[in-house]
Image (cartoon, rainbow, N blue to C red):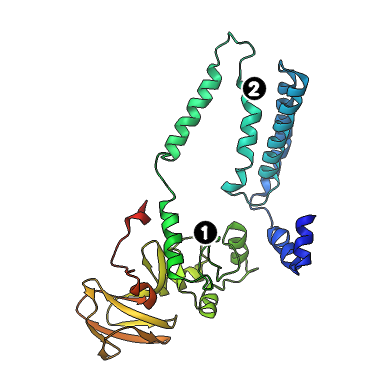
Amino acid sequence: MAIAFYFFARGAWDSFIYCTFTHNIVASEHPWRLLFLIPSIAIIVIGARLIARKEAAAEIRRRRIFLFLIASIYGAALISLWPIIETEHWLPFYPIAGAAVVPLLVPKRRRESPQLLFAVLALELFWIVHVSTPWRDHTVPSMTMIQQATALTTPAEPVIDLKGEIVFRRRAFYYVLEKLTKRAISKGRLHDTIAADVLRTHTMVSIPDNPSFPRDGRAFLSRNFVRVGCVRVAGMMVNGREFRIEVPTQYSLLSDHGDFRGTLDGTPYEGPRFLVAGSHTVDASHRTAVVWQRAAALGFSPFIADRRCEQ
């Protein structure tokens, strides 16, 4: 109630209702999952009775049953009723479920060997190592992307990302690109305005290519943004003599041999130029890239690989 009142007091009531409720009301992608509700209820009842019969003080049993019911009801509702399930939806479930289930694996008497408990622990440790390498810092690519994006832009300049993963910059495209949004775009309920938003806000920085971008927006970004380090900036690799600009701004020409030597639109290239939307030509003897002038001035180049982005 306090949160709702806060948004209402600041004139954001409509946005609060839309983002909290309206946007999330969609048809289930797997309606047959409703059939899981009945066996889920049966499992919940059986589990609660097992905990109630455990040898422990009444207060401890009540607490264990409470944790078990919280976790199991959440899991059952998620599987059976929630229309679209994503991996992060399970994050609240795991710790509570673990705290509720572990007491069931502990032997009733101290003399009994906790073999089942050790087997579950060994399986979990094996799964952690199998799925990931916990001794490696997997945040390096993400942190480097944030550092490079913030180095290339000011706080007033927007970026293009999926869910705000650049963190410290506003997004040019309003909707977070998760399953609900992508489904709404594919069904025509929402419009893919990435191209228009980039041009309207003069956005020059984007995250690398990702299949979560909607089809048209992804194609626009692929045509008009080039990978430099862990991010993309306005620009492109030039294949042949002619290239087409859709994002007008100040551009530099770079060569895989260092400084660009050649002509741009028929005149010798001597430094960054403002390129309007439309066709342009280059004449050079080496591979060429058109790169947003600010990124080029800061040393970013599509011809220089950053190993931190490849983990």
Give residue 50's mark: none
Residue 16 sits in which quadrant?
bottom right
Q: Residue at x 69, y 58 (%)?
A: 24
Q: Please state which of residues 183 and 237 is positioned toward the viewer in this rendering.
A: 237
| 38 with respect to 218 (left or right) | right
Q: Nearer the viewer, mark 1 or mark 2?
A: 1
Q: Residue at x 78, y 20 (%)?
A: 58
Which residue in the rendered view is the most extreme toward the left?
285
Q: Residue at x 71, y 59 (%)?
A: 20
Cα–Cα span, label 1 and label 2 = 40 Å
Residue 57: x and y in percent read 75, 18
Quarter of the image where the N terminus is located: bottom right
Instruction: Give the residue type at disc 2.
Output: Leu
Residue 129 sits in which quadrant?
top left
Residue with the mark numbered 2: 104
The vertical placement of 29 against 304, above or below, is above
Give residue 165's mark: 1
Instruction: Give the residue type at disc 1.
Output: Glu
Give the class, few, some or many, for how many residues have Cα within 10 Å of label 1's Cα (few <14, many ≥20): some
Q: Secondary structure at mark 2?
A: helix
**Of marks 1 and 2, which one's residue comes earlier in the chain?**
2
Residue 68 sits in which quadrant?
top right
Q: Please state which of residues 155 and 125 is positioned toward the viewer in this rendering.
A: 155
Which residue in the rendered view is the most extreme toward the bottom?
267
Q: Secondary structure at mark 1?
A: loop
Give the class, few, some or many, for how many residues have Cα within 10 Å of label 2's Cα (few <14, many ≥20): some
| 176 with respect to 83 (left or right) | left
